[in-house]
Image (cartoon, rainbow, N blue to C red):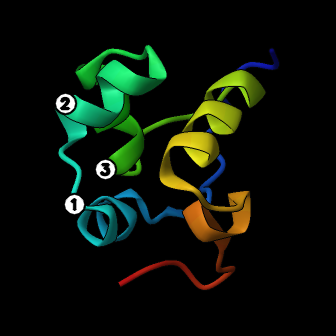
Amino acid sequence: MPPDNGEVHFIGVHLDRLLERRGLTLTELADRVGVTVVNLSVLKNGRAKAIRFSTLTALCRELDCQPGDLLSYRPGGFD
């Protein structure tokens, strides 16, 4: 993995929206996906620097969504 060069990333994570629509808590999703609540929280709050494809696959499976439903790119940032 390359070193963090301080580059600002504009990838939004829409986990809150998907959890609400599915009636799931972060803890329930973490149990289903096999990821710690802390790691999912880091992702949900936009502080993650990376996500494994296996985790993305598991999230999409459990949330019945596509990666584009979970992540989005906005070059101007997020409000």
Q: CA distance from mark 2 to mark 3?
A: 15 Å
Q: Amino acid at mark 2?
A: Thr
The answer to whether any part of residue 50 appears in the image is no
* Rendered location of residue 74, percent (x, y): 65, 80
Q: Secondary structure at mark 2?
A: helix
Give the residue at mark 3: 45
Mark nearer the N terminus (2 vs 3) = 2
> Where on the picture, by quarter, is residue 78?
bottom left
Q: Amino acid at mark 1?
A: Gly
Classify 10 Å Cα crowding around label 2: few (below 14), some (14-19), many (20 and above): some
**Residue 73 located left or right of residue 31:** right
> Where on the picture, by quarter, is residue 36?
top left
Q: CA distance from mark 3 to mark 1?
A: 19 Å
* Rendered location of residue 16, percent (x, y): 29, 62
CB atoms at circles 2 and 1 under 8 Å apart? Answer: no
Q: Which mark is residue 27?
A: 2
* Rendered location of residue 43, percent (x, y): 42, 40
Q: Nearer the viewer, mark 3 or mark 1?
A: 1
Give the residue at mark 1: 23
Q: Amino acid at mark 3?
A: Asn
* Rendered location of residue 21, percent (x, y): 31, 72
Mark nearer the N terminus (3 vs 1) = 1
